[in-house]
Amino acid sequence: MSESDQTDLLFSEVLRFNRNRTHKRQGRSPLRVAFLRNYTVDPTVEYFKYFCVQDNFMPDVFMGGYDTVLQDVLGEKTPLYSFAPGLIILCLKGEMLMPGIFSGISAVNEATMKREADDALTFIEKVLFEIRKRSNAAILIHSFEPVIYPSLGILDYQKKHAQTQTIRGLNQKLILLGDRFKNVHVVDMDLLRSRLGHITFSDPTLWQFGKIPYSYAASKTIALEYMKFVRALQGKTKKCLVLDCDNTLWGGIVGEDGINNIKIGGDFPGSAYSEFQRSILSLHNRGILIALCSRNNEKDVWEVFEKNPEMTLRKKHFVCAKINWATKVKNLREIANDLNIGLDSLVFADDSEFEINMVKKLLPQVATLQLQKDPALYAEQLLSCGFFDALSLSDEDLK
């Protein structure tokens, strides 16, 4: 399930779906997840449970107490370890853990800033240590979002030990700390905030009333980010991107427009298709298989790749191609068979709503990416889908 599929998803729909409780466990992969937090995470958890079911997981969730993270992880027979999670998510908000730094009260005192940051890091290290003594669960830990309006204003960024640089330095140390403990991964919260923008990401009113720092839009984005980790941890990362050609890799229809009149390179919209091809090439370069599935004359398609100088992708980049007048469903089955991978390893990208819906109906195992009407959005749509995210990149992948 990609971010673009969830643009119009309402929180009320998510709650209604989760409360229905008629989802069949049969055929779904069990997933036991514990949330340890120092703020109210309920909206994010609801979105997460919804996305788990959509991705064919059946989640069981443990909620730690409010701001009782250390108590939750201490002791051999606490409820956390009785629950036996496979994934633990540490949701720590800097405003609660380091109030002096985040409020700006200590911003003019370098020694105080350093001491509070060190204390926070020591706390997190203690939590990770206690978990690892008793559990092999994968751990996700939130990074800290730098303050939007630092107490020293424009001077803050110029000072090495003021708010902004202190928080960024702490995040770098979080990554190093995660490396010391097996299977610990950092969720980049500032990156998620940058995608939505601060005004959309945060909700000051919810924070003041219920210690819910994030808007519903942000909670949805955070939950989708969790799913990228879940798929990677559960070995559900997709292996092959299957692409249409006309109005997908280039603008226009090659059989009608000819290889020199399709839209690729140069000014918009050709520039957008070039950007999309570069994003595909980046996936290829990190080990993702690329295939073609196009209702077209094969000779016309290969001429584009061979003779159009604006093409970034070339024939050598594709491990498999089905260019004919058969149905996309039939061709996708053959691609999976030829590559000796499951249908659930494929992601099919096409601009046609009809083709996407047909694949969804007849091949529900195949992930789909219906490209939006504006080709300028294609590259971001592909890179944000999360289907190909992995937690490692081996030499074998690159080969």
Image (cartoon, helix red, strand yellow):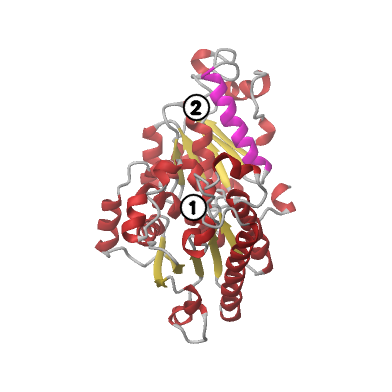
* Left or right of 157 in this view: 37: left
Q: Residues within 10 Å of mark 1 (few under 14, many from 20)?
A: many
- Secondary structure beneath dot 2 equals helix
Query: Disc 1 marks which residue?
Result: 225
Residue 376 got which mark?
2
Residue 57 got which mark?
none
**Residue 333 in view, yes or no:** no
* Image vertical order of residue 140 relative to residue 361, above or below: below
Residue 356 in percent (x, y) is at: 40, 38
Does the stretch in magenta take in 275? yes
Q: Which residues are magenta?
A: 268-285
Q: CA distance from mark 1 to mark 2?
A: 23 Å
Residue 189 in percent (x, y) is at: 52, 52
Contact flag, marks 1 and 2 (Cβ < 8 Å) = no
Residue drawn at point x = 32 percent, y = 46 percent = 9
Residue most extreme to the front: 108
Q: Amino acid type of disc 2?
A: Ala
Does the stretch in magenta take in 180? no
Q: Nearer the viewer, residue 179 or 9?
A: 179
